[in-house]
Image: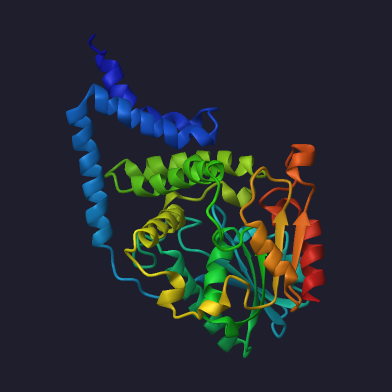
Amino acid sequence: MSVPLVLRIVLPLAWMILPFSSIPTVYFFPISALCLIFSAVLQPIVTLLMFGSFVTMITISYLGRPKFKERLLDVKLSGKKDGEILVFVHGWPDNGEIWNKNVPAFEPDYHCAVVDLPNFRMKEPEEKSPSWGYSIDELASCFELTVHKLLADHKKDSCTVIAHDFGSLIAAFAIRRNPSLYSRAAHIDVWMRPEKRLPLTHIIIMGVAYQYWNAFLFLLQWIPIFGTPAADLMNRFSSQTICKSVGGIAHTSKNCPAAGNYLYFYYHLNKTQEALGLCRLFDQIHEIPQDRGRSPVVPTLFMYAADKPIMFHGKSDAKKIAEKKDGSKVVAIGKPFKEEKKIKIGHWLQFHGAEQFNKELRAWLA
C-alpha cells in the first residue's frame, strides 16, 4: 500500500511540535526516535542522507572546535565589602537571578558574588564563549579562576560556595581540584554523580525523559538557517514542562537558549567516553588521592527538597555528609512526596521556599 506524500513529508518533522503539545516530557525523546524509525521505513534513502548529513556536520564541527581557554565567569557583586565571600552558582535552565530572593537576606553580613554561567541568559558571542560550550571539568577550571580573582581582589584566603543543580556539580568538581580555596560549601538539591548504578526506571526518567532531549536540542543548533531558532523555541517550551515536573518554574528559567544545554551534552558524552575507556576519570586527570573518596573535603550543607517525585542525589551520599563531624549537615525541606503526592516547594527550593531556605542557610553559616 502506498503512503500519501503528505505523510512522507510531515512524519519526519512531527517531533518538532512536541514542546508545544500537552504530551508529557517523558515521551519527547521516545516519540522523536519513533519518528526517525518511521521515516526510515517510509523513505529510507532520504532519511539516511538527512541523518548522515546531520551527524557528519556535527562531528566535523565538534572535532574542529577551538581549544579550551580558561576565562573569568560573569559575576555580580553586592553586600558587605569586607565580609566573608559567598559565591552563588545557578544551574539549568536558570541564571544568576534565581538567587534574587536569597542574596538580599545575606548582603548585610556577607559579600555576595553571584555567578552567571556562559550562554544561560543569551547565546554569547563566539569570541567570549565557544559555540560548543564547556565541559563540566572546563567550567570547574573557569570557576576556580574566577574564585582566585575574587579572593585576590578582596584579600581573602577562602570563600563559601552556595550552588544549585548543575552549579552544584561544577562546584563539587572545583572543590575536589583545589579545596584550599573554599572554607565550606552548600549544595542545593544535587550532589555530584550518583555513587551506584541507578535503577532502570530512574535512568529512563532522568535520561530519556529530558536529559537526552536537552542534549539533542543543543545539537540541533548546527542545522543551518533554522536550527538555532527552532532549538531555542523548543527549549523555551520544553524546559518549562520539565521544570514543572519537579517543582514549578522560576521566572529566570523561561528564556534559557538551547546553547545553555551544553552541560547535558558533555555530561553524557563524558560518561560514555569513561565507560568505554576513551578518556581518563576526573580524579585521574587531576591526580586526586583515591583515599579522598566521595565525601566532601570541606564542611558541607546539603539541602534538598523532599517533596519531589524523584531525587537528584543518592541516599548513601547524604548519609556520608550527615555523618561527618566537621559541621556538615543534611536538611530536607518539605514533606516526602510519597505522603502528600504533591509538590509544594520542589527542586527550586531557594526560590519557591526562600524563607525556609534562607533561615536554614543562615543558621548553618553562623
Residue displayed at 50% across by 57% down: 120
In the picture provided, is 323 more to the left or to the right than 232?
right
Task: Estimate the x, y position of residue 195 in percent, counting from the top left.
Answer: 56, 61
Give whichever of 53, 150 is nearer the camera.
53
Task: Estimate the x, y position of residue 156 in percent, counting from the top left.
Answer: 63, 88
Residue displayed at 27% across by 51% down: 58
Task: Estimate the x, y position of residue 359 in percent, counting from the top left.
Answer: 82, 64
The answer to whether 20 is drawn above or below residue 107 in the figure is: above
Residue displayed at 73% across by 46% down: 307
Task: Estimate the x, y position of residue 353 in percent, counting from the top left.
Answer: 76, 53
The answer to whether 51 is drawn above or below residue 347 in the figure is: above
Instruction: Tell me the colour scheme of the image.
Output: rainbow
Q: Quadrant of the N terminus?
A: top left
Q: Is residue 146 visible?
A: no
The answer to whether 108 is drawn above or below residue 119 in the figure is: below
Q: Quadrant of residue 150?
A: bottom right
Q: Quadrant of residue 281?
A: bottom left
Residue sticking out furthest to the top: 1
In the picture provided, is 117 more to the left or to the right than 11?
right
In the picture provided, is 48 more to the left or to the right than 326?
left
Q: Is residue 164 visible?
A: yes
Residue displayed at 54% across by 52% down: 93
- Count of numbered labels shown in the rendering: 0
Q: Quadrant of the C terminus?
A: bottom right
